[in-house]
Amino acid sequence: MAFVLPSVLRTTAARLSALYLLLFGVCAVVLVFYMTSLSVSLLTTQTMETINEEAASLGRAYQRGGIPLLVRMVGQRSRQPGANLYLIADSHGRILAGNVENLQPGVLETNGWTEVPFRYERYGEGAERTQSQSETLPDARSESLASHDAIALVLRLPNEMIIMVGRDLGEPQRFRDVVRQSLMIALGMMALGGILIWFLVGRRALIRIDNISKAGRRIMGGDLSGRLPVTGAGDEFDRLSENLNAMLARIASLNEGLRQVSDNIAHDLKTPLTRLRNRAEGAIAANADPQEYREALEQTIRESDQLIKTFNAILMISRLEAGYSSEQVVEVDMTATVQDVIELYEPLSEEMDVSLDVSLEKGIAIQGNRELIAQALSNVIDNAIKYATLDGKSSRVRVKLQQGDGNVRLSVSDDGPGIPEATDRERVTERFVRLEKSRSQPGSGLGLSLAKAVMKFHNGTLDLLPENPGLTVLMTFPGR
């Protein structure tokens, strides 16, 4: 705990909690004094109203029966349980009747309400103090007087006699003390609970932050497979960890894509580059005529163009898989786009003796990039025409565009040998992957990989579905 507590106090949450606790404490103290003062004020107001009523009653008795009736009424009321303070004194301040034995000096000189509470002593309290107590405690009388506080209304009769009606303030003071003590205990318990909760929550938060920091150090050390801990509580730490884990997964995916690009360039492009060099070297070493040199250069240019196309395809795939493209996203008329690609491949299909069956719903549009969609569809149709004629027989390629369930589905089906194995159907969408039966056909193995990247760019999916016979490539775009 000696190491945890200073660490907790250094956290932003702890500092905010301390500020909130300080603000709570100030508000609580103000509330205590306000409540107690308000309570005493209300009780004092009620007491003064009671005293006014008593004074008015005694005034009416004086008017009816004079001093005898007034003295008799004061005597009766002063002996009742819980009686107010009653006192009748002569013009010199000598007490003649009532239940007050001694007063703080100067009280009877007041005319009207006493400005401040005064000390007094009831009859009988002085007799309880023995002589020995008086000798050992010479200030016993003053201490006794100090133990009782009261407020009173002092009135002067026409014959200069003094009448006083008052009320002990012990009840309001006790009420104030009880309220203040109760509030202080409640606030103390709340403050203690707040401190304990703050410490426990802060300690738990500190442990979780330390775990995140440790995981972060492992990741910075090169372990991109590591992930930040998620407790499942669903709080802000879990949300932060989940977002960072998603980011790390994305970074790992991009690094894997970069590694694949490097491996593809190093392995799959090495053979055509070597073939170009050997052809150029053979043309130089041979004693050939200008026409042979020209044919060798033209073939070299054709293969160089194919290499450039391959490099461009690799770069486009990497850019699309990274989620970055300079291509603009606009509203695309899918019906018109598919029709344009079909018209482009109609001459090739006639030459390859492949019939194109087209079924297009009209008025279908999505948000996307027309050039990328056309490029992906071109790759798929080119593959369908090329592999549908592997057995040398006339075949059919079916292109269908339809909308439903909030999605736009574009499918291309052929009657070729297809891809019977599910594992092969997953592999052919990777870069430079070509199955054994397709090795005899021209191509680089990037067509389906580019189509998959285009679908990912459009938040869609590319699925390869087996037919009997043949294969269906289904491209599903999210609707608008």
Image: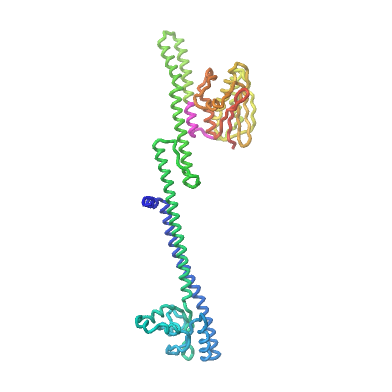
Residue 51 visible in image? no
Residue 152 point in image, percent of width and height: 47, 81
| Residue 404 painted magenta | no
Nearer to us in this view, 123 or 342: 123
Q: Which residues are magenta?
A: 312-329
Residue 320 among those drawn in magenta: yes
Q: Is 69 rendered above or below residue 187?
A: below
Q: Position of residue 200 (x, y in %)?
A: 44, 52
Number of on-image labels: 0
**Is 355 drawn above or below residue 176 in the view shown?**
above
Write the residue at 44% across / 29% down.
Answer: 259
Is 70 placed left or right of 396 in the picture? left
Instruction: Quadrant for residue 129, please give it.
Output: bottom left
Q: Position of residue 65 (x, y in %)?
A: 54, 91
Task: Reply above or below: 258 against 79.
Answer: above
* Quadrant housing the C terminus: top right
Q: Is residue 402 visible?
A: yes
Q: Nearer the viewer, residue 468 or 258?
A: 468
The colour scheme used to paint the residues is rainbow
Percent position of residue 173, x then y:
46, 73
Left or right of residue 394: residue 78: left
In which quadrant of the rendered view does residue 418 lie? top right
